[in-house]
Amino acid sequence: MMKIPRQALAVILVLLFCFFGCVSAPFKLDTLSTGSSVHKLNLVFVPLNYPDREDFLKDREKLAQRLQKAAPFNEFPDAVKFWDLAMDERQSRKFLIFQKALPPVRVDAGFLKQIFKKIGANYKLILVDNTGTVDCPELSSPEATSILIVGRRHFDQEPFLKSAFFHELGHSLGLRDESPKSYAQSCAPGYPNCAASKEEAAKWWGALLGKGATVRFFHGCCGRADHFRPTEASLMNDVYYASNFGPVNEAYLRKVLKGYRPS
């Protein structure tokens, strides 16, 4: 049996490590802040259809900065951890499957698990589609991994892009769609911002009545006119004119963000 010299064996082992390392993690994931990822709201930004990565980085930086200045996120500067994910076109075709049905992009489950291993915690995967016209979130709980898509072409003007991102992020953190229109995201009513009855609404946000002129019992949410929402217009309803989440949603998000500890 032929014996392999120690130096040659070491080289072979290094090559095998590099090869399998590339196969198991064929993408680059960079954190934009130090400290642990555990007990944080981890936001992973992924570019789609950006010919120039620098353009994506500019968009991502604008969205991250706007989120850090928006209420109530501005009250918890250490609660959110931002990440950038980069991979080449061949890799993106393998892990991101484009389809005509909704959602327009399906993400490979194995790819999501690889990201989880790198981060060491659950996260929100934010696909920013430079040529897309569809915004699509998963209505999820704050602690779960979920996916949201922001179509850059749908909201070409920067303020609207920011509002669309906030809206979809709100869904990923458990906020319902507050629109009574048929195009609203189809979902069952639920806490904290879409009540099935006025009695239920009174239990959830009745304590805020009279403390803010905007909080009342307004008809319509989750695409149903007979349900109730707390504000006439918020980022969970009208991304074109609303400038904030509204008192009820902010109170809910404040509780969520309090659950994330600084490093």
Image (cartoon, rainbow, N blue to C red):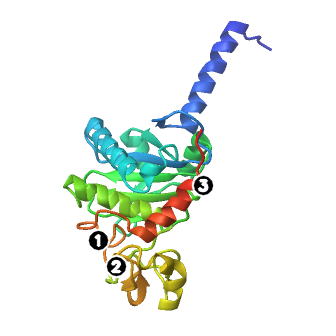
Alpha-carbon span between mark 2 and mark 3: 28 Å
Residue 105 is at least partly visible in this image: no
Determine which residue is flagged by label 2: 179
| 10 Å crowding of disc 3: few (<14), some (14-19), many (20+) | some
Query: Residue at 63% of width from left, 14% of height from top?
Result: 11
- Three-letter amino acid code of the residue under disc 1: Asp
Asked whether 105 or 3 is in front, the reply is 105
| 10 Å crowding of disc 1: few (<14), some (14-19), many (20+) | some
Callout 1–callout 2 Cβ contact below 8 Å: yes
Vertical comparison of 173 with 238: above or below: above
The C terminus: image quadrant: top right
- Three-letter amino acid code of the residue under disc 2: Ser
Q: Residue furthest left?
A: 157
Query: Residue at 39% of width from left, 77% of height from top?
Result: 215
Vertical comparison of 6 with 184: above or below: above
Marking on residue 259: 3
Tag in front: 2 or 3: 3
Place of residue 55 in the rendered image (x, y in percent of width and height, measured from the top left): 26, 40
* Mark 3 vs 1, N-terminal side: 1
* In the image: residue 183, left or right of residue 260: left
Place of residue 197 in the rendered image (x, y in percent of width and height, measured from the top left): 49, 90
Vertical comparison of 65 with 183: above or below: above
Query: Residue at 30% of width from left, 42% of height from top?
Result: 56
Place of residue 259 in the rendered image (x, y in percent of width and height, measured from the top left): 60, 55
Tag in front: 3 or 1: 3
Asked whether 82 or 116 is in front, the reply is 82
Element under label 2?
loop
| 10 Å crowding of disc 2: few (<14), some (14-19), many (20+) | many
Marking on residue 238: 1
Callout 2–callout 3 Cβ contact below 8 Å: no
Q: Quadrant of residue 219?
A: bottom left
Element under label 3?
loop
